């Protein structure tokens, strides 16, 4: 039933995250990829020419010949836009789309800390979407912006959420070992990562220390009260393609044994699982207690890149509990995470013009608004 | 004055650490390399044939033709032996050398925690050598064993020592990113480190959590009272050749600002610097506050591999202070560290038969016992 | 129709190639994996415990609990065995299986040059299977050995075959850049491949220079007349996980333009494609003339790892023609190649007790001997 | 005697090659580094600030505070300039310096094929400097440009030269495996070289096929007659920091056995060795016939990065002889090679205003004009 699919556009379609979004949308059960937008130089050229395709295999045939358009609301008609734009331009462009009545799901940092902008990990704080109403009221239209967190934040906060819910995480010391792809392409020069690593990524530590407090915070419908969780982060760039590793030592208000923690992590589920959103992993947190896991190359594709893998769960003599967390930074941490937020919006009927329908029952593919009365 | 040099032998001379010891002893002002010993298969063959030389350049000509002997006291005559043996054999072999009246400096883990065995970082706890007398008394001879700590421990504890002396380190959360060479050769398979890293090194975490407590402890001449420092460590193996990175978050009893910490670290000196031991770096701790330092490839050779480099010094909102520490794991952390302990022994006249004497003559620094009054 | 599937066993099931065979056989339309055999230490333990699983994801559930048996015909009942044994043991073990009446497809080098042993790349020289009859006659039973070539040879000879058929390849200068996985696990130490490469792989150059002459040779039913093709090979090990790159300069008897060559390569098909063998790629040779292709990471999975990718086709001023060839060394070059040979045997009814049936028509899965009268 | 040193400036002092030149000139016996020039953004800032220093250790103190100037003859007074400029600007800037009467030694490609521009490997074709007179005549002044070849060309042609002199090289098939540093900084993105390699470097193959013909050619004082050597090159970029590997198969007019070749290579010397130029390696070609050599990391520093290492010398069944050649691409292949050409000029008294004089005194080698009678 293609007529029922929601038209979607990608802003920043030629970058690394954009490329992964193209792959994920090439055969999506709810969404139809109708627009590929990018910054100046690419616009006007067929996608296969404009893109420097960096994923295995070829550009999907369905989009190879599609002409890339300018990333502005006049050139892009879709009611739902996924933004993989660079932060240097994302701020204004996304604002323009929201002003033009579109639902914007952004992977960029620009609007994440906006008071009425939801910063969402769908399993954790889908209820923060209550801010959409406030944002619409402020803008006076149907458009709005929802944001996907930083790639390291997502993996970290997914691991923290079930422990926080059960025992109140108070403090966490975090050391990340982040993959090269997190910097996009061309990104990190090879001369910096052959026989080397770098203890610095501009702005990253601040995001990891701040964003979890918003995501784990309480939303009263108009604003978010940040959670009283103190995070101390040191980041590192390592010679790995994909997959961010995070060593986490944490303190909880109530005692948690490693066994408790493992059980909570493995059992964790949220709205994406309940509603069976198309990109949702069955199990968002895989616990792997083999002595040498998780490892980026072997574990990053868990749940098609949408599950995090947690291991090395044991007592920490300083703070109480240690975990090692691995998340696929360009899937769950970027393209897949952004798409999952979009599916969450669709499932709740928040895409302008597309009410939430009965949803995709077992084995079905018709989409979130099947049978919906589409209004103009 | 070659007659004044102290004859030295290397046990485990064909391994990676043994090779670095060979290089460091090829032209040493105090020591003369007289014995190359190894385990079964290598004995009886010329060194250049027995060794699978893995360092740049060729085997030094001075040792190329020397025949490797069995690692037992009957075949090795030197009064001072440096052991780079594998832990699987080091325990008994080193014991036999000590029983035979030799001064043994060991890089192996086996005897590190022995109650009367000094575990020494020369800048920090040269006074623990008081245990030598106790050990000699127990053995009834001149022989003894002194140990060099784990490669990560050395870098970590060097950074902790000046802060501990000034403000009492109480707790530390430590995340290491360790180089491949730490596992020796063949060591870690390339399949495990291409596009990958591993959050596990057998036994390593325990060493890092335990050894600093002994090194920073108080020695009363017969035993060591461990320092009340709690360390929580998570280790990782990363695709780097040499140079262990350690992210350290720590809590001190008395407050330390980052500026205080930097000043203490940069000013730190010890007996190796005072006595101008040949392998001692002028400045054992280099503070580099550039935003993206330290980095293994660029900084591991500081002080000819004998200095650690500390950066990323800043407040930690959880524990108080954060540091990033880099140490060359096979130099300061192994071969160079072992040699520096040997020089410390020589400087104190602890090598059997070699009082701290006038030293090896002009242009060579003060010598192992410059100014000493001791007779043999 | 599971009863019609041919029972298959893997010898050397715990190695890297064995692991890939397990994955490929976990859901195979013609074969049923009934036996996992390995050398001494693994036998008697469940597969999931015995194996050091090195592929992404977990051990397939269908084999996780299966007990590994000894690699001898008494413990393994399958009529078809795929051998991924190490060359140090493969020779005798495979011989024993053949003597016991089994069809053996070997990935090991031991029997490749046997006069009545087919060395097969299914697209190129399926007709060499005529040797099976000669071999059976010699052995006096139904058993026999067929071999899969060296991993570099397969990629090279697939690229040479269509050009040889059209224009007679006379001489070729070959420089390989081979992936780490080609040496198995643990294989090449990481210390040898970080910031480094090695111009040596024991025995490899001889295989690459010799095997193509047999594969491209003429078979008269009792022996193979080698093709008069002279290959000069220099091999290199490079820091890549999977995918062997081969730079080929070649001379043909009749002139070939680059365009001719590309057309011949892209159009090449063989019995696997005609018979639609389950593991056969639709197009065994993908020609990619983008200026910077092929690349191992981006192209090795072409045709699910079973197609080679050829680029950089241009005139060579010295020999006439240059090609750059990439093949997945552990798929087409080992596990997948071995399986394809097994499928070729099954398709021709050469598995003892399993006549060739009508074959798997469009969309079907019943297997090569569907409807066959199975004899004991 | 600092007054006797020749003042030298570096154009492009902030790039990777410029950095290596700075190190090599920090304590040079003949030259005094007086000028650091770079393109627009760097000019006016102290060198330590302007440079993104990528070599181990710190910026040499002697240049750290020196202000970088614009790369034009008005701002740079030295009579001898070493150009490490990018090819996008090198052409015009170098021309301007030559027009202003300076001796320019360029590492850029722009002027290499100019009919009266020497393309020099000092051991091979120092006699091509006869073109300087022709060039001066054309320009009407003392200025001129001499060029250093491509980094792969230098290593290749050094290996070819002694064989060519003895037996006339006619044809060579060449496959390179080039280090990341060859592309400068930032150069090749890490995403392209983790678990990957690339069979393409823009313009490189043409240089390798053309430049050796000029270098090995005959110079009659006004032009160079190219040598009749046909080279066919395929290049590859591999995940190595420094050190280009080159697999060479070659055909000579007169037969050469591997033993002949090894003897010729090892015995090769030229004017740099005869005149003991400061940067000249004692032995420009090291022959290492161990089975797994040369290797980039272990062998690139031979002769302080100025010697090439040749191994894998054996008969090639197609062309006659095979060699594996390794050269340090940013030392002998760039910074060191450029400097050696400059020393050659100084030794011949070709720097404007500096006759080949008595040289810089005791302990420093014979000096640029030891024993020369020439007046300015």
Image (spheres, coloured by chain):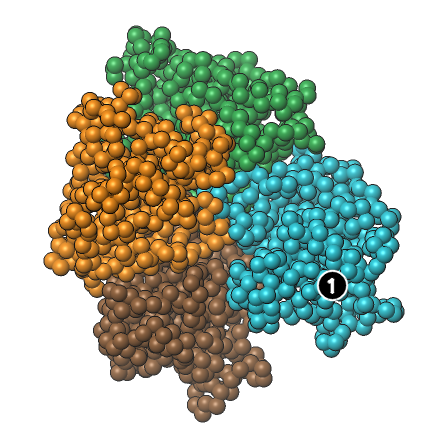
Chain colours: A green, B cyan, C orange, D brown
* Residue lying at 63% horizontally and 64% vertically, measured from the top left: B69
On the image, numbered disc 1 is attached to which residue? B80
Horizontal and vertical percent position of residue B68: 61, 65
Horizontal and vertical percent position of residue A230: 64, 28
Left or right of C362, for residue C174: right
Left or right of A260, for residue A127: left
Residue A139 visible in the displayed image = no
Left or right of D116, for residue D46: right
* Above or below, comparing residue A59 to residue D234 in the picture: above
* Residue lying at 57% horizontally and 16% vertically, measured from the top left: A218
> Which of D132/A304 is in front?
A304
Horizontal and vertical percent position of residue B169: 75, 40
Q: Residue furthest bottom?
A: D373
Task: Please identify the quadrant where the C terminus of chain A is shown.
Answer: top left
* Residue lying at 83% horizontally and 43% vertically, measured from the top left: B225
> Which of C360/D188 is in front?
C360
What's the chain of the residue with tag 1? B
Horizontal and vertical percent position of residue A171: 65, 28
* Residue lying at 42% horizontally and 27% vertically, measured from the top left: C63
Task: Please identify the quadrant where the N terminus of chain A is shown.
Answer: top left
> Which of A303/C125 is in front?
C125
User: How many neighbours does mark 1 have within 10 angstroms: few (below 14), some (14-19), or many (20 or more)?
Assistant: many
Report which quarter residue A63 is drawn in: top left
Count of numbered labels shown in the rendering: 1
Give the secondary structure at mark 1: strand
């Amino acid at each position: 039933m293609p007529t029922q699919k929601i038209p979607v556009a990608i802003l920043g379609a030629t970058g690394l995250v954009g490329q992964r979004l193209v792959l994920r949308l090439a055969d999506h059960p709810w969404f139809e990829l109708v627009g590929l937008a990018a910054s100046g130089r690419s616009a006007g050229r067929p996608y296969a020419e404009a893109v420097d395709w960096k994923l295995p295999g070829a550009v999907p045939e369905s989009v190879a010949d599609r002409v890339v358009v300018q990333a502005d609301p006049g050139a892009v008609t879709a009611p739902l836009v996924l933004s993989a734009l660079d932060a240097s331009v994302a701020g204004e462009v996304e604002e323009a789309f929201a002003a033009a009545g579109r639902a914007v799901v952004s992977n960029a940092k620009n609007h994440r800390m906006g008071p009425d902008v939801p910063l969402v990990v769908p399993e954790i704080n889908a209820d923060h979407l209550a801010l959409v109403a406030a944002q619409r009221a402020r803008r006076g239209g149907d458009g709005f912006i929802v944001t996907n967190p930083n790639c390291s934040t997502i993996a970290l906060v997914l691991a923290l959420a079930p422990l926080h819910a059960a025992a109140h995480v108070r403090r966490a010391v975090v050391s990340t070992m982040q993959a090269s792809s997190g910097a996009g392409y061309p990104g990190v020069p090879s001369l910096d990562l052959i026989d080397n690593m770098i203890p610095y990524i501009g702005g990253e530590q601040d995001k990891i220390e701040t964003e979890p407090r918003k995501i784990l915070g309480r939303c009263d419908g108009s604003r978010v009260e940040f959670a009283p969780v103190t995070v101390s982060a040191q980041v590192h760039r390592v010679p790995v393609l994909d997959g961010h590793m995070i060593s986490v030592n944490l303190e909880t208000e109530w005692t948690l044994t490693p066994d408790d923690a493992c059980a909570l992590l493995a059992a964790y589920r949220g709205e994406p699982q309940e509603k069976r959103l198309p990109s949702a992993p069955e199990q968002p947190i895989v616990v792997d207690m083999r002595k040498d896991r998780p490892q980026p190359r072997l574990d990053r594709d868990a749940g098609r890149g949408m599950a995090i893998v947690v291991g090395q769960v044991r007592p920490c003599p300083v703070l109480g509990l240690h975990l090692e967390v691995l998340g696929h930074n360009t899937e769950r941490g970027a393209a897949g995470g952004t798409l999952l937020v979009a599916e969450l919006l669709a499932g709740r009927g928040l895409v302008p013009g597309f009410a939430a329908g009965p949803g995709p029952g077992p084995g079905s593919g018709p989409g979130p608004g099947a049978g919906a009365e589409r209004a103009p």
